[in-house]
Image: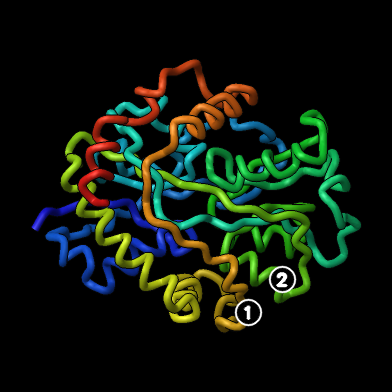
Amino acid sequence: MTKMRLETTSPFQGLAELVADDEGLFAEEGIEIEWVKRANTPREVDPKITTPDGLSAFGSHGEAFEKGGADMYNACEWGNYRRVQDTEAKGRQLGRRSIMVWAGIVVAPDSDAYSPQQLANVQVAVPYYFGTHYLTYQMLEGFLPRDLIQTCRAPNGSSARYDALINGDVAATTLTEPYLSLAEKNGCRVIIEGMYHGTEVASDDIDADTYAAFNRAVKKAVRMINADKRKYMQYFIDRHKGQHPGIETMTVDDFRLSRLQMVDPAPIPEEELQRTYEWMRSWGMIDELSPDVLVDVHRQQAAHEVSA
């Protein structure tokens, strides 16, 4: 068995990996998964921190990896561009993960905001360098000039951001599942929502054959999930029980199954990589880099050809 040390994940970003592990699909491919805990960002909202400048991209994702404690992790594609720029552990992206993360900007029931335009100069609490941070920018800049898009630092866990919204500590925040559905269940309003890709970042210890075997197991899990979304939506409840009392009140009927979108893991398309890179450059969130720095193109191609 080949051991892979993966940073811990959650259903909203790693459902197929969790299912593949639980169902023995990794073992079928000769892989043993060791889940490695990672750190979390501060648990409070800080309205005085309004940009990611000066903050580490390794506040949670990549934290164990950078210390040599993990071989691979997955996180949003935007954030991973920044992490592979900043890595001191030679991390490189190898391809896109299987789940499309669904998230939305949410306001409290008594908010005056009903459209994205009404969020002009309203602080949206986001976890900087995480997917909901970048998605917030992309969703709002379709409605507002950039100088009217305001954000502040929030914890990386949607649980804490949901509480901050309910307690009136923030006017708006961006949530992932299951907290997006919990917010709706409790009368909050989703102003705008969307999906985003994530990628895997790996060390040199993960060769193309190992990553190909990993992806074969993930593809099997994707087929299982897509065949019975109701069954696997239960992960969003079971994996979050104990984190928040509101989750205890939820059933699968509280979720929209259409928000669970699974695809086979795949290489990052060159033209999409370039557009993402240029968009991040336009926000000053990444330096001038070559594609070879962002992605191990040869290992990515070899792995996905073998796993096809």
Q: Identify the residue at image location x=46%, y=49%.
A: 40
The image quarter containing residue 163 is: bottom right
| Left or right relative to 103: residue 267 | left
Q: Is residue 297 above or below residue 113?
A: above
Name the spot of residue 167 as percent of width and height, x first. Answer: 74, 63
Residue 223 numbered mark, or none = none
Label 1's element? Answer: helix
Amino acid type for the residue under numbered disc 1:
Asp
- The residue pinned by badge 1 equals 254
Which quadrant of the view contains residue 24? bottom left
For residue 139, which quarter of the picture?
Answer: top right
251 to the left or right of 16: right
Q: Position of residue 64 (x, y in %)?
A: 32, 44
Q: Are marks 2 and 1 in contact (CB under 8 Å)?
A: yes
Question: With 33 as the anchor, is 13 left or right in this view?
Answer: right
Residue shown at 67% from the left, 44% from the top:
136
Provide the secondary structure element on which disc 2 rests: helix
Q: Please provide percent x and percent y for residue 151.
A: 71, 40
Residue in front for this viewpoint, 65 or 99: 99
Q: Which label is found at residue 184? A: 2
Label 2 crowd bin: few (<14), some (14–19), many (20+), radius 10 Å = some
Q: Residues within 10 Å of mark 1 (few under 14, many from 20)?
A: few
Q: Nearer the viewer, residue 112 or 194?
A: 194
Where 266 sits versus 149, above or below? Answer: below
Q: Name the residue at the left extreme.
A: 1
The amino acid pointed to by label 2 is Glu
Residue 286 shows in this picture: yes
Q: CA distance from mark 2 to mark 1?
A: 9 Å
Residue 238 in view in this figure: no
Q: Earlier in the sequence, mark 2 or mark 1?
A: 2
Image quadrant containing the N terminus: bottom left
